[in-house]
Amino acid sequence: MALNLPVFYQRTASAVVFAAIMLGGLLWNSWSLIVLAGLIEYLCMKEYIQLVQKMDPDTHWPPNLIWVVQALGLIWLFLSSVYYSYQSPWPALICAPAFVFLAAMLPEKGNWKAGMYAVAGFLYIVLPLMLLVQMHTINKIIPLAIILMIWTSDTMAYLVGSFIGKTPFSPISPKKTMEGVVGGSILTVVTGGVFGYFSHYYNIYDWMILSLIVSVAAPAGDLLQSKMKRIAGVKDSGNIMPGHGGALDRFDSVLVVLPFTFCYVWFFMPSMF
């Protein structure tokens, strides 16, 4: 198959800009990370609501409900980020969904279904981004390493699948192969081990366990998003990135990986500062 150069250049340029924004937000300072998380939350929540409306067109979404959910997500992300720096995150994580559901019910009585979708979106999108910010307060290297592991997992799975992939991994995502997923997982764990060997932060076993969690959760996140798009009858969740689709297409793996990696980091990788 001949390489489509205009499409290739478009995808490459988008990927470079995307990587620059991500790395800048992760590395600059705590405020840049909060701004980055807020931008991701806004774009992903917008696309999530659009997908839900197509998945379940009978659900009534008052126009102001969408803005209420968006505003609550951004406010909670900011307030919990400040709160996390000083105290345990668990009270905020437990109470947040209840507030979102109540706010979703306010615009018009009987919108319980839209309220449940709003809570699901909050848990799917806002909660992981809160945890990303919290991991940054534990150690600044952890969020960066996890994002790089996810990119490694996706890239290696694609390359291995392209060269030797034959067995379909799931009917939900026919382009993925079992060989690609397994090969990508192995190479991600190896990469995590190499990073841990040369890193001065924590030990090699921590990084290998984190990379193993990433290699399992990242494909699951991709499959979840593929299933949602299939039910909604769309190819991409949006078109924010030319050649790559929408924000949810780019962060589907990240959103599922973060809660699992956070649990390991919180209990087994204490702050080094």
Image: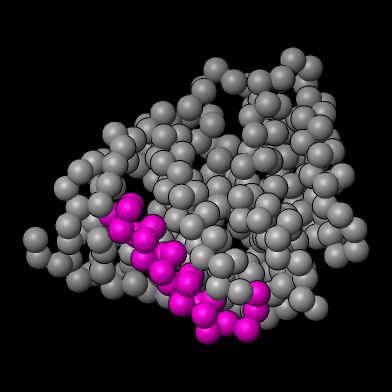
In the image, what residue occupies the spot 28% across and 54% down?
Answer: 180
Q: Nearer the viewer, residue 112 or 65?
A: 112
Q: In the rendered view, tell whether residue 43 sits above or below residue 107.
A: below
Q: Residue furthest right?
A: 86
Query: What's the magenta region?
Result: 180-202
Q: Quadrant of the N terminus?
A: bottom left
Q: Residue furthest top?
A: 110
Q: Which of 152 and 116 is in front in this view?
A: 152
Query: Does the magenta stretch mainly form a helix, a strand or a loop?
Result: helix
Q: Quadrant of residue 189?
A: bottom left
Q: Residue 155 in the image: x percent, y percent?
A: 35, 64
Q: Nearer the viewer, residue 199 or 259?
A: 199
In the image, what residue occupies the spot 34% across and 72% down?
Answer: 12
Side of 199 relative to 102 (left or right): left
Q: In the rendered view, tell whether residue 109 sits above or below residue 266.
A: above
Side of 225 relative to 3 (left or right): right
Q: Quadrant of the C terminus?
A: bottom right
In the image, what residue occupies the spot 37% across and 61% down?
Answer: 186
Indicate whether residue 184 is drawn in magenta.
Answer: yes
Q: Note whether residue 241 is visible.
A: yes
Q: In the rendered view, tell whether residue 9 sits above or below residue 86.
A: below
In the image, what residue occupies the spot 20% across and 43% down?
Answer: 167
Q: Quadrant of residue 205?
A: bottom right
Q: Residue 17 in the image: x percent, y percent?
A: 47, 74
Indicate whether residue 34 is drawn in magenta.
Answer: no
The total of numbered circles placed on residues is 0
Q: Note whether residue 141 is visible.
A: no
Q: Residue 25 in the image: x percent, y percent?
A: 63, 73
Q: Residue 251 in the image: x percent, y percent?
A: 51, 54
Instruction: Tell me the colour scheme of the image.
Output: one colour
